[in-house]
């Protein structure tokens, strides 16, 4: 910094103000300092800055799975929003969803240079008393039933599932079968509960639930079973990837969509409009979830954020395409 100041003919304080983007420096002086930086190859030392300011401009993200479309899109949205605020993201995948792994992840983040933590965790592991947080690090949780200890941002899982079931009932289907996500998933549980309560509220008896694991392969296996159910005219799949496998299985068994069976998915992944037929689905606003997670931890860092236990739900919307229709007469 002293070399830059000498070459530019200014004080070291002026060089500091320019490198940190502070106001109070004329444009001519700023250009002069930047030219000296380029000539000398000067780079501000981010580690020294962090020690001086007491912040690292980095957010930690803990997630269990990078294989599901929902987690990938949420992570992408968090990284994009963080960059817009001038923050980098440190990703810490957790291989096995156990309490010890959760504790270990928080411990490792406590050793890393992060200012706050966002947790993408759809299973029920954050409400245990054994989880300890790094001192002074604020936490926001995405996609979880995290109890009253954490600030949560999530999609309105129940509202989206209700809209999917009501859409099929309004088309005239007597009932709606459900291809659910894995049993340990918070999102899958909320969607299945809403499916069941919406049917019973409409005076319909819920058929047996069919379980998948979010993958297209599990949707295909479930579809082979549902294709043999003569009373099945409508299926709500808990995500679009399982719906894709379901569509393939129904095609293989000669069950036409939507003439014989209507199908609704959940997520509205970019490819869902190109399924055959194009998939009616529930749109999740992943970008908004990511934005609210980042703004939530930044607000908590400034000590003007929401209190622990607050849950923000991001609305969903039904996207109607060609995979749903009224049942054929006599069905």
Image (tube, helix red, strand yellow):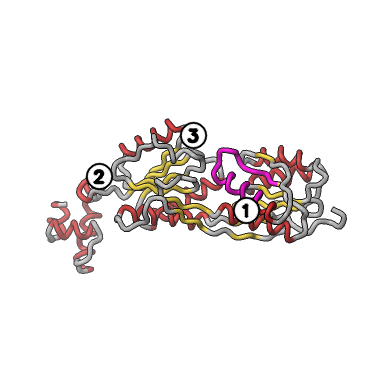
Q: Which residue is mark 1?
A: 161
Q: Tell me if mark 3 has few (under 14), some (14-19) or many (20+) residues whose alpha carbon lies within 10 angstroms of its own.
A: some
- On the question of residue 158 being in view, the answer is yes
Q: CA distance from mark 3 to mark 2?
A: 33 Å
| Residue 76 magenta | no
Question: Please, what secondary structure does the residue beneath circle 1 have?
Answer: helix
Q: Which residues are magenta?
A: 178-197
Quadrant of the image occupied by residue 136: top left
Q: Name the disc covering residue 97, or none.
A: 3
Q: Tell me if mark 2 has few (under 14), some (14-19) or many (20+) residues whose alpha carbon lies within 10 angstroms of its own.
A: few
Question: Please, what secondary structure does the residue beneath circle 2 have?
Answer: helix
3 and 2 marks in contact (CB < 8 Å) = no
Q: Tell me if mark 1 has few (under 14), some (14-19) or many (20+) residues whose alpha carbon lies within 10 angstroms of its own.
A: many
Q: Main secondary structure of the magenta part?
A: helix
Q: CA distance from mark 3 to mark 1?
A: 26 Å
Residue for point 50% across, 47% down: 143
- Residue 40 position within the rendered picture, expressed as x and y whole percent measured from the top left: 21, 51
Residue for point 63% across, 40% down: 215
Residue 135 higher or lower than 170, as above or below: above
Quadrant of the image occupied by residue 135: top left
- Residue 35 position within the rendered picture, expressed as x and y whole percent measured from the top left: 23, 59
Q: Seen in the image, is 142 located left or right of residue 201?
A: left
Question: Which residue is most to the top?
Answer: 100
- Residue 89 position within the rendered picture, expressed as x and y whole percent measured from the top left: 39, 47
Q: Which residue is mark 2?
A: 47
| Foreground disc of the pair 1, 2 | 1
| Residue 180 magenta | yes
Q: CA distance from mark 1 to mark 2?
A: 47 Å
């Amino acid at each position: 910094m002293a070399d830059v100041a000498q070459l530019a003919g200014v004080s070291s304080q002026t060089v500091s103000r320019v490198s940190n983007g502070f106001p109070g420096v004329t444009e001519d002086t700023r250009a002069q300092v930047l030219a000296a930086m380029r000539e000398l190859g000067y780079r501000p030392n981010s580690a020294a800055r962090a020690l001086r300011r007491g912040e690292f401009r980095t957010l930690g993200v803990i997630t269990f799975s990078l294989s599901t479309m929902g987690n990938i899109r949420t992570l992408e949205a968090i990284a994009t929003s963080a960059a817009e605020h001038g923050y980098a993201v440190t990703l810490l995948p957790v291989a096995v969803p156990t309490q010890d792994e959760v504790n270990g992840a928080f411990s490792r983040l406590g050793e890393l240079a992060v200012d706050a933590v966002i947790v993408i965790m759809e299973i029920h592991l954050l409400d245990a008393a054994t989880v300890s947080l790094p001192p002074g690090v604020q936490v926001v949780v995405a996609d979880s039933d995290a109890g009253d200890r954490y600030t949560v941002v999530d999609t309105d899982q129940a509202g989206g599932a209700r809209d999917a079931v009501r859409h099929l009932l309004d088309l005239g289907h007597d009932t709606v079968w459900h291809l659910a996500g894995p049993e340990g998933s918070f999102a899958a549980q909320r969607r299945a509960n809403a499916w069941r309560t919406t049917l019973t509220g409409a005076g319909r008896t819920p058929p047996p639930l069919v379980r998948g694991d979010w993958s297209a392969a599990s949707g295909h296996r479930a579809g082979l079973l549902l294709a043999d159910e003569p009373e099945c005219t409508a299926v709500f799949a808990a995500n679009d990837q399982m719906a894709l496998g379901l569509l393939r299985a129904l095609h293989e068994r000669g069950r036409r969509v939507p003439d014989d069976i209507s199908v609704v998915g959940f997520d509205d992944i970019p490819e869902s409009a190109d399924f055959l037929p194009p998939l009616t689905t529930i749109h999740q606003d992943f970008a908004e979830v990511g934005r609210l997670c980042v703004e939530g931890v930044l607000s908590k860092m400034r000590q003007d954020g929401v209190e622990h236990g607050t849950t923000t739900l991001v609305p969903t919307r039904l996207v109607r395409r060609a995979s749903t229709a009224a049942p054929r007469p006599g069905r």
